[in-house]
Amino acid sequence: MSGGGGGYMPEIKSNQDVDCNKLSMVTSLSSPVSHVILNTKVGDELEIQLITPASLQVFNANGELVGSLLVTQRDRIIKCINEGVKFVAIVLKINGGNCEIRIKTS
């Protein structure tokens, strides 16, 4: 007799299927600009912009470049931005030149 009791397997969505407004992640800035990071504080809200078709950059309220984003969900974020969704980066921690942020919709 062959075994058989197949169990329930929930459908797992890829990151590409996540609703843009529910997309959120914690990461670190890539290539942070040192003199701008010096004036950045925990809790600051930074703006994420699509600069070229594949480049996400982060700016402070003064329009200064703070750093770049290299995240696994980059393509999904870019698709959402192209659909009109705006993203921000909230500064969670600064340790020397390392800046940890939470990416979320604004």
Image (cartoon, grey):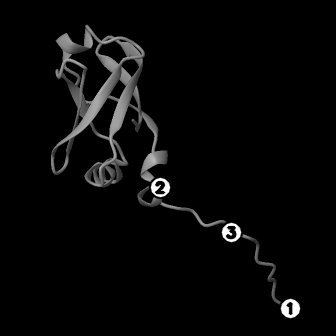
Quadrant housing residue 83: bottom left
Q: Residue 40 versus residue 2: which sits nearer the camera?
A: 40
Quadrant housing residue 101: top left
Q: Are marks 1 and 3 in contact (CB under 8 Å)?
A: no
Q: Residue 95 versus residue 68: which sits nearer the camera?
A: 68
Q: Are marks 2 and 1 in contact (CB under 8 Å)?
A: no
**Figure check: 91 above or below 106:** above
Residue at 29% across / 39% down in the picture? 70
Considering the numbered disc 1 on the image, is that residue within a helix, a strand or a loop? loop
Disc 3 versus disc 2: distance between alpha carbons? Answer: 19 Å
| Residue holding disc 3 | 9
First along the sequence among labels 3 and 2: 3
Residue 34 appears left or right of 102: left
Front tag of 1 and 3: 3
**Figure check: 76 above or below 90:** below
Label 1: few (<14), some or many (≥20) within 10 Å? Answer: few
First along the sequence among labels 2 and 1: 1
Q: Give the residue type that dot 1 points to.
A: Met
Label 2: few (<14), some or many (≥20) within 10 Å? Answer: few
Question: Residue 99: x, y in percent?
Answer: 34, 20
Considering the numbered disc 3 on the image, is that residue within a helix, a strand or a loop? loop
**Quadrant in the picture for the C terminus:** top left
| Residue holding disc 2 | 18
Residue at the top extreme, as displayed: 38
**Figure check: 69 above or below 7:** above
Q: Give the residue type that dot 3 points to.
A: Met
Q: Are marks 3 and 2 in contact (CB under 8 Å)?
A: no
| Residue holding disc 1 | 1
**Quadrant in the picture for the N terminus:** bottom right
Front tag of 2 and 1: 2
First along the sequence among labels 1 and 3: 1
Residue at 29% across / 48% down in the picture? 81
